Amino acid sequence: MTRRGYPSDVDDDTYLFLLPYLLLSPEDARQRKYSIREVLNALLWVACTGAQWAYLPHDFPPAETVRQQAHRWFEAGCFENAAHDLRVLSRVERSRNGEPTAIIIDSRTLQSTPESGHRAGFDGAKKRKGTKVHLAVDTLGHLLAVLTTPANEQDRAQVFDLCLEVQEATGVNVEVAFVDQGYTGEQTARQATEAGVELVVVKRPEATKGFILLPRRWVVERSFAWLSRFRRLGRDLERLPSTLVGFHFLAACVLLCHNLKPLFA
């Protein structure tokens, strides 16, 4: 099987931007057998298709080489660092301050698989066994922080850790977090305050039925939809939670680079 110019192949501008973040060793290191660009293309193919590592087309580097390098990048936070810098560029390009003062927090449950089943939990609300992915985005939908927990854990219990990660990423610049009614509670509000963030619960209007577009809240739902374009994020296919988080930031980098192409030109 060959990829025949699969659309996931990284373009020149995106590759040149990401390259400094991916150089954990010199590009011309003697032990390097395959180019960084080919390994990155293979990783994007896996992210876009959701295929198993072993099913990588033969004109990519070996699957084990790609998998090991991907884990090195994920553990080093390479894509996370790139996503944060791309977010700043995107905000400035839209005449916003580089760092946000408001965020939106929400979660979704990914169905478990045999690979991730050992750390899965049962989400009683969604009637699904799997992993919860907790997201914090700015008001433009840019990814700021990702946490994963078993699906049986409460959303409100992750607010403190999410807010701390967001404050670290933004230089303690965030003041407000918009959330849904699943995050109500005095303890949750107090924990957010300890992280320097005011928790604002956006409630659904009473006596309403069907879909309602809630102010602020829709932004994070759109971010989940953007990330769902990457089939690797459709289910929890990873043995390690750090790999699942890494794929989220990889997807964020690809989306932001696509949006900023006119700026790179």
Image (cartoon, grey):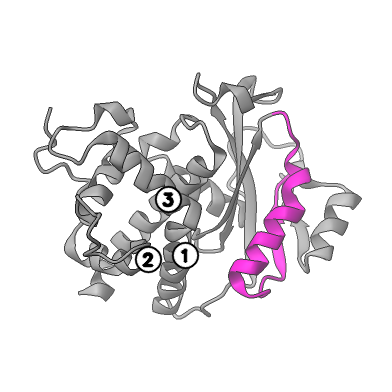
The CA span between labels 3 and 2 is 12 Å
Pick the residue in front: 22 or 249. 22
The tag earlier along the polypeptide, 1 or 3, is 3
Location of mark 3 (residue): 72
Q: Nearer the viewer, residue 39 or 214?
A: 39
Q: Which residue is mark 1?
A: 81
The answer to if 224 sits in the magenta stretch is no
Q: Is residue 53 left or right of residue 180?
A: left
Q: Nearer the viewer, residue 195 or 75?
A: 75
- Asked whether the beta carbons under mark 1 and mark 2 sit within 8 Å of each other, the answer is yes
What amino acid is labelled 2 in the image?
Tyr
Q: Measured along the vertical axis of the image, is residue 200 above or below residue 154?
A: below
- In the rendered structure, the answer to whether residue 95 lies left or right of residue 221 reads left
Tag 3 secondary structure = helix
Residues at discs 1 and 3 in contact (Cβ within 8 Å)? no
In the image, which is nearer the foreground, mark 1 or mark 2? 2
From the top left corner, tell me how far across and down residue 157 is, in percent.
Answer: 78, 44
Q: Give the magenta range.
A: 152-181
| 203 vs 89: above or below | above
Q: Residue furthest left?
A: 4
